[in-house]
Amino acid sequence: MLELRHRGSCPGPREAVSLPHREGEAAGGDHETESTSDKETDIDDRYGDLDSRTDSDIPEIPPSSDRTPEILKKALSGLSSRWKNWWIRGILTLTMISLFFLIIYMGSFMLMLLVLGIQVKCFHEIITIGYRVYHSYDLPWFRTLSWYFLLCVNYFFYGETVADYFATFVQREEQLQFLIRYHRFISFALYLAGFCMFVLSLVKKHYRLQFYMFAWTHVTLLITVTQSHLVIQNLFEGMIWFLVPISSVICNDITAYLFGFFFGRTPLIKAAYVLSKYQYFVCPVEYRSDVNSFVTECEPSELFQLQTYSLPPFLKAVLRQERVSLYPFQIHSIALSTFASLIGPFGGFFASGFKRAFKIKDFANTIPGHGGIMDRFDCQYLMATFVHVYITSFIRGPNPSKVLQQLLVLQPEQQLNIYKTLKTHLIEKGILQPALKV
Amino acid sequence: MIAFFFIIIYLGPMVLMIIVMCVQIKCFHEIITIGYNVYHSYDLPWFRTLSWYFLLCVNYFFYGETVTDYFFTLVQREEPLRILSKYHRFISFTLYLIGFCMFVLSLVKKHYRLQFYMFGWTHVTLLIVVTQSHLVIHNLFEGMIWFIVPISCVICNDIMAYMFGFFFGRTPLIKLSPKKTWEGFIGGFFATVVFGLLLSYVMSGYRCFVCPVEYNNDTNSFTVDCEPSDLFRLQEYNIPGVIQSVIGWKTVRMYPFQIHSIALSTFASLIGPFGGFFASGFKRAFKIKDFANTIPGHGGIMDRFDCQYLMATFVNVYIASFIRGPNPSKLIQQFLTLRPDQQLHIFNTLRSHLIDKGMLTSTTEDK
């Protein structure tokens, strides 16, 4: 019996650690099997350690190799290892921050590509962890299927977003029109093809493993892809809605470590003040067909125009001023910062719990000294959703070009009815003069 | 069970909605229980509470969106409902967040992995069960026929494939389900298409099945009364030459809906079984014979509904893509929340569009 089980398990020195326990588990623990005469019992028992109650018997997953660049290694060869670590972290932090500023300078389209790149990398990191946990790297088809599902879901989301924002560009091209009109159907058909491939790829000995990987892929998609698309929607609302929340979380990370709760918020209010002055950050991103590029020019909304507020009495005494001029956006930025400070860390705890559960130190080794991309973005996890929900609930109404698009798709009689309703409404409100004879 | 089904159809859309909701809760319960059994995690602190809490949150979110769309006038009248619907997304998100934070706070040192597994299990189950049930309800509101015909097609396909397989079956279809055969699959396909055509012919004649469900302000109840759309009016079609010689008729009177029903039946026969194979694979992976023992002789509720899994999504996507355009009253609502300059811009664009199409004649000066 021992040899049969041992033969069925994957090779590798780490398996030796868990072997004694597996034996005990299989002997006593077949209580989940009910009736089917399944010859897989012996071979599936190697999943016993996957489903075990406690974490203590799970083997540790060794991290992949060190990827610090040679230059840095040579330059820091003189220092002791503790300081070396600090220097590596510091240099990489500065590099990341300057890259970030460079990309902001290049504009919203580059930012969108950056977000997409980060999303793909995060997905890859989490899926790789899944492969290591389940030793399922050799599973037939599975790598292809995971990437295929990522592609499908991205296609669906980008189709929905892109169609909204690039309405003029899209109207011009015939093929794009067709793709947009039947977008949901096409996305669904693509997903279905993936689903059928999954069902057809189920192999007798690996059912449970395949289902686990299927679920792992879907949960990962749910987390990474939806968040990244909400980030892009926020970005299109105006770069300030992208920069301020991300900076809040990063700032909170750093300053919570150093100073605590209160100081995490003040610099953000100043940053919001500075950014609100520039159209580049404040205006919604639009695609102009004449210029064939993205522009961020507009009349800033009321949210970004200075207003004077009279201070409540107790603050008056402290600051000795009657009034203060603020951008209304700064008040919203207080809400955003509060969320980043209070709830953002839960995203970090979630990721820490995840790392402890699967006994990994970092998500990956992409950034030397910092771990993987997911390590940098774990706190951002909930922030993007919050900002999106905040914007749709409190700031922005529905998107006018989307409303227009939908209007143009209706039947002519319905359009006429709506036209008449709108006309009466606008005349009532005094927006339209009744001089029109139509 | 079939008799029950007919009684419920008689009772009307509101009861159907409640039935769908109960089926959804029971399916969720069954799958989560399987998860507990697999992971021996029944005693995990907080986890049962959290799973039900997440179910409640997601249901609240979906029902809120549906209710806001369909019962707009009712919602606008009642003050508390209006506020709830205006900040609906924010409230749902807050509720979900509370659940998330509770999960993070409940992580216990020795059970991290188990807790993450159950968290993932709950979310995937929610994704499957709750989204499908809400799409079913959307279809229902489009008209009861969009609810009854797809479900009947899937059931018919199940039964017909079994019968054909029983009488003629020889070549096995897929290793996952050794009882299914190619003969059953193909025979079931043709039988379902015919069944779909007949059923839609019968049902398209009745207003109560064909009209979208609406909430009537005056009578304060649901009404299914309307002028049937083009889809449900008999039309003459010319039969192509090939079939003409066989049947001997020149033209046939059919409802356009029957042509759509061919698409629905085809999906039910070809792709529906994949939902069944998925469930069979799932049962084999976790070594269970049935999902539960709710219905004697038939297994759990999930066993009955596994093939329906993809059908509801397909019908919803089909309706959204090919049948119904956007909802005009919803568009008006959205329009009224825009800023005046945006409203003016849209109004002018619409006007020039209508003039282009010749629906309006203009002899005026622009404002």
Image: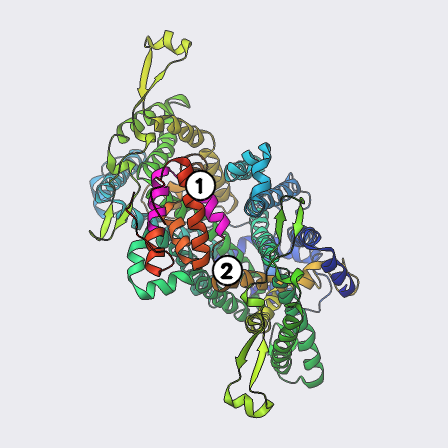
Residue stretch in magenta:
B328-350
Query: Residue B255 at x, y = what percent?
Result: 58, 72
- Magenta span has B336? yes
Q: Nearer the viewer, mark 1 or mark 2?
A: 1
In front of the other: A431 or B323: A431
Depicted A109 relative to depicted A137: above or below: above
Q: Quadrant of residue A210?
A: bottom right
Secondary structure under the numbered disc 1 in the rendered image: helix
Instruction: Mark yes or no: residue B37 visible.
Output: no
Picture quarter with the N terminus of chain A: bottom right
- Magenta span has A121? no
Q: Which chain does the residue under circle 1 lie in?
A: B
Depicted B71 relative to depicted A281: above or below: below
Q: Is residue A68 left or right of residue B2?
A: left
Q: Quadrant of residue A55?
A: top right
Point out which mark residue B19 bears. none
Q: Amino acid at mark 2?
A: Arg
| Residue holding disc 2 | B324
| Residue holding disc 1 | B336
Residue drawn at x 59%, y 62% as measured from the top left: B228
Query: Residue B321 at x, y = what percent?
Result: 47, 62
Q: Say how the picture is coloured.
A: rainbow
Secondary structure under the numbered disc 2 in the rendered image: loop
CA separation in Å, label 1 and label 2: 22 Å
In front of the other: A358 or B93: B93
Depicted A209 relative to depicted A277: above or below: below
